[in-house]
């Protein structure tokens, strides 16, 4: 299943136990206070991250802190205007991963980060910038079930000074209940890879060759805007680079990069990529159409 976070040392039921998790690429640690049991979930959902752990007398230097309380797992970080609390450990880890990626991007001054899914086709990345209910996460799993390597189902860092996407090293997740019209191949694939889950989310525990580990690079060669609807067959329409650029800019959340640099870099990515709009209903049909469009390109 690939490299995962190492196990925590100490009494997990000790409410005062402070454990610091140090991640390569993030200058300050994450503190877990009395909630070492979250590590078992983190171990599964992280792939390729180098993580070290130490017991500590305090969490003063932490970039974020998760503390177990009577109401659940309470997280504080610089990206939250006020603490958030989740009773379910899987939901708490889901939300923690948002800030983990923000902390990673914040410590890489030249890095962009797009709210997008990304799959590897013929040596390059095809990305699907986020649109609500467009089905990017479900489509990502359809690609994995068809043998494509998944880079990201939600966020994709872009390396500084390049058009290369970096795998964030996070398992994909699906919202619960799962779609009832995804087809038998999708259903069987997910059933055999059920990972941590809650009443809201299910992680799909991909094999090592199905998910690129954290830091793996590949150039962006395609941008596809998704529109899911009641259509008889999937339709691919060529899209101007300017339209793809608008969507990419809207989905960037690396705010420390100067605006002009963001524009220039995303413009270069859009100009060098094939840009399409895909209207589709069936994920399996969409995969087949996109594989044909990007075959050998």
Image: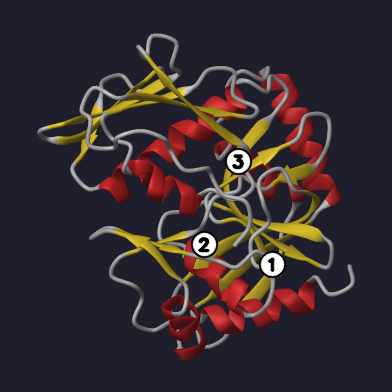
Q: Quarter-wise, where is residue 109 in the image?
A: top right
Q: Label 1 neighbourhood size at 10 Å, few (<14), some (14-19), many (20+)?
A: some
Q: Locate residue 31: give its quadrant.
A: top left
Q: Are marks 3 and 2 in contact (CB under 8 Å)?
A: no
127 up-or-down from 156: above or below: below
Q: Is residue 98 left or right of residue 180?
A: right
Task: Of the two numbered discs 1 and 3 on the same chain, state the one appearing first in sequence.
Answer: 3
Taking the view exactly as shown, the residue that stands out farthest to the top is: 60
Q: Which residue is mark 1?
A: 209
Residue 284 screen position, x and y as percent: 57, 83
Q: Which mark is residue 136?
A: 2
What separation in Å lies between label 1 and label 3 (alpha carbons)?
A: 23 Å
Of the two numbered discs 3 and 2 on the same chain, state the one appearing first in sequence: 3
**Other residues around mark 3 within 10 Å, as few (<14) / some (14–19) / many (≥20):** many
Helix, strand or loop at label 2? It is helix
279 or 181, nearer to the observer: 181
Q: Which residue is mark 3?
A: 114
Foreground of the two, 255 or 1: 1
Where disc 1 sits, the SS reads loop
């Amino acid at each position: 299943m690939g490299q995962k976070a190492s196990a925590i040392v100490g009494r997990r039921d000790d409410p005062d136990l402070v454990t610091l998790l140090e991640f390569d690429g993030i200058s300050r640690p994450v503190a877990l206070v009395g909630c070492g049991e979250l590590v078992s979930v983190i171990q599964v959902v992280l792939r390729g991250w180098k993580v070290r752990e130490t017991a500590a007398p305090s969490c003063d230097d932490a970039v974020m802190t998760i503390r177990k309380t009577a109401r659940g797992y309470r997280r504080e970080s610089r990206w939250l205007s006020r603490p958030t609390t989740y009773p379910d450990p899987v939901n708490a880890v889901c939300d923690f991963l948002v800030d983990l990626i923000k902390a990673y991007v914040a410590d890489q001054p030249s890095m962009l980060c797009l709210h997008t899914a990304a799959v590897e086709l013929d040596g390059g990345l095809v990305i699907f910038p986020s649109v609500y209910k467009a089905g990017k996460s479900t489509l990502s799993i359809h690609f994995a079930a068809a043998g494509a390597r998944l880079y990201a189902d939600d966020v994709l860092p872009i390396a500084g000074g390049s058009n290369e996407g970096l795998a964030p090293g996070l398992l994909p997740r699906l919202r619960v209940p799962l779609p009832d019209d995804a087809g038998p191949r999708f259903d069987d694939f997910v059933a055999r890879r059920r990972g941590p889950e809650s009443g809201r989310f299910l992680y799909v525990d991909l094999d090592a060759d199905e998910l690129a580990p954290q830091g793996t690079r590949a150039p962006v060669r395609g941008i596809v805007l998704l529109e899911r609807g009641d259509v008889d067959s999937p339709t691919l329409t060529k899209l101007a680079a300017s339209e793809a650029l608008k969507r990419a800019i809207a989905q960037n959340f690396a705010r420390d990069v100067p605006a002009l640099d963001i524009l220039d870099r995303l413009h270069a990515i859009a100009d060098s990529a094939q840009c399409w709009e895909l209207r589709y209903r069936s994920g399996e049909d969409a995969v087949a159409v996109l594989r044909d469009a990007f075959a050998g390109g």
